[in-house]
Image (tube, helix red, strand yellow):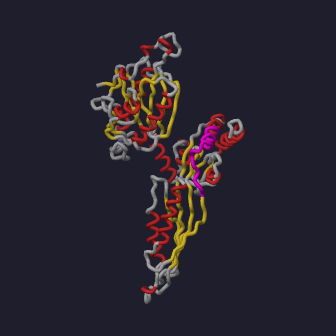
Amino acid sequence: MVFPPSRIPDTTATLRPDSPTGAGPGGRVPLAVGIDIGGTKVAAGVVDGRGRILAELRRSTPGRDPRAVEQVIVELVGELAARHDIEAVGIGAAGWMDLAGARVVFSPHLAWRDEPLQATMESLLGRPVLITNDADAAAWAEWRFGAGRGHERLIMLTLGTGIGGALMIDGRVERGSFGMAGEFGHQIIMPGGHRCECGNRGCWEQYASGNALGREGRELAKKHSPMAAGLLDAVQGRHKDITGNVVTGRRGGVFSLLRVGGKAAHSGSRMAEGISAIEELAHKILAIHAMTDHAAGISFNVGLVRGGQSVNSVAPWAEAEIDMRYRTPEQREAATVRLTEIVARSTVPGTTAELTIKGEFLPMLAQSPGGKALFELYQQAARASGFAVEGEFTNGCADSGFTAALGAPTLCATGPQGYGGHSLDERLRLDSLVPRAQAAARTILWLERAGL
Ligand SMILES: [Zn+2]
């Protein structure tokens, strides 16, 4: 069984060779939308029968929830169809598609498991939909329009989050007996090696993909390997600390002090008369840490504890310093209510407790229209200064939260790049100083022109 190119809407037959736009009789241009679903981005493009991309849109991949990903596809196609005459939609995604092009059997980086994606999307979009493996689609496209033109045998390797592959023989994508042919990224090159999302160990993808490079760089950097300085440069854009992205969203944070009071007593002769503040604090710490929900972006860390007066006394006092991080003001409010309840509830009878806020960083929310416009302006300024930049949400807090909370469009981390922040090995990349300063200056100079 082979991938039939004829299933991709073949519009070339209706094109007039003398028409530069590919318009058919009556000036009508039959078009399709191609969707590429990646681990981080969903890209959509309007393509004509000659493989030309006429319009493009991108969205972040909304987590691993299949319904949310489908919704993003519907929105992208809707937006493009409002401006173009779209006849059909093709969807390429990393994963194992069945031979009929109807179901996603398994996708290691997305949440689809035996999903009838073709039927779902055809009913949602009201148009014929073709689904296929992203590397298979890329191989076919290169064979038809790109580097593989005129060749009947070719191999495609797609390097990104993972490693995808495809095989074309005699002008057809060879899909094998089950639709899995050409998955070179999941060849085992290191028996017993790193665990792969596919379930096996030691796949090539675990050693040579973008993810693998990033992991190795981070491991070396963490171990303060002498290789790390050079390697950090080599993997720029992969290592978490040296992505060079500007920060368009930050979590908020509250640093607070929890002080618990008890009653001292000699622990040898009169322990029953004492009230242990340390015991009460221990209960409270467990309850506080249990409120952490990394997926929701809220975390509680007791980073410091003190207390007691001597080893043979029941502890009359104990205190803990708490670092709470959150994404939205609503989370802060709900967490504060729960924290207040924990502080007020005594497990050890007779203890007292009070909570004092010592410092606070407000969250910086990414999606305000002004913030988005400012970010896009900065992206143009960065391009003019010779580098590309993306936005990212960071778990760190900063003063930028205060201006963002007041409604002012805010960007953060536009300074020079570096790595090893908050450690003795913190470094600055000197070569990033001038272009980053130029981009910041250009952004400021262009503010008025952009209506900001
Ligand atoms: Zn694998």
Quadrant position of the N terminus in the picture: top left
In this view, the residue farthest toward the left is: 177
Residue 14 drawn above or below residue 116 = above
Q: In the shown orientation, is residue 378 left or right of residue 272?
A: right
Residue 137 drawn above or below residue 294 = above
* Total numbered labels placed on residues in the image: 0
Rendered image quadrant of residue 438: top right
Rendered image quadrant of residue 361: bottom right
Q: In the shown orientation, is residue 288 left or right of residue 442?
A: left
Q: In the shown orientation, is residue 303 left or right of residue 114?
A: right
Which of these two is toward me, 291 or 276?
A: 291
Residue at point 33%, 41% (across, down): 113
Q: In what quadrant does ligand 1 lie?
A: top left
Residue at point 52%, 63% (across, down): 336
Q: Is residue 295 magenta?
A: no
Is residue 113 in sight in this rendering?
Answer: yes
In this view, the residue farthest toward the top is: 18
Q: In the shown orientation, is residue 173 left or right of residue 321?
A: left
Residue 314 drawn above or below residue 57 = below
Which of these two is toward me, 431 or 79?
A: 79
Rendered image quadrant of residue 379: top right
Which of these two is toward me, 315 or 20?
A: 20
- The location of residue 200, given as percent across then percent down, is 33, 44
In this view, the residue farthest toward the bottom is: 269
The residue range painted magenta reads 361-377
- The location of residue 199, given as percent across then percent down, is 33, 44
- The location of residue 286, given as percent across then percent down, is 44, 67
Residue at point 43%, 22% (across, down): 148
- The location of residue 230, given as percent across then percent down, is 56, 45
Is residue 425 in sight in this rendering?
Answer: no
Q: Is residue 367 magenta?
A: yes
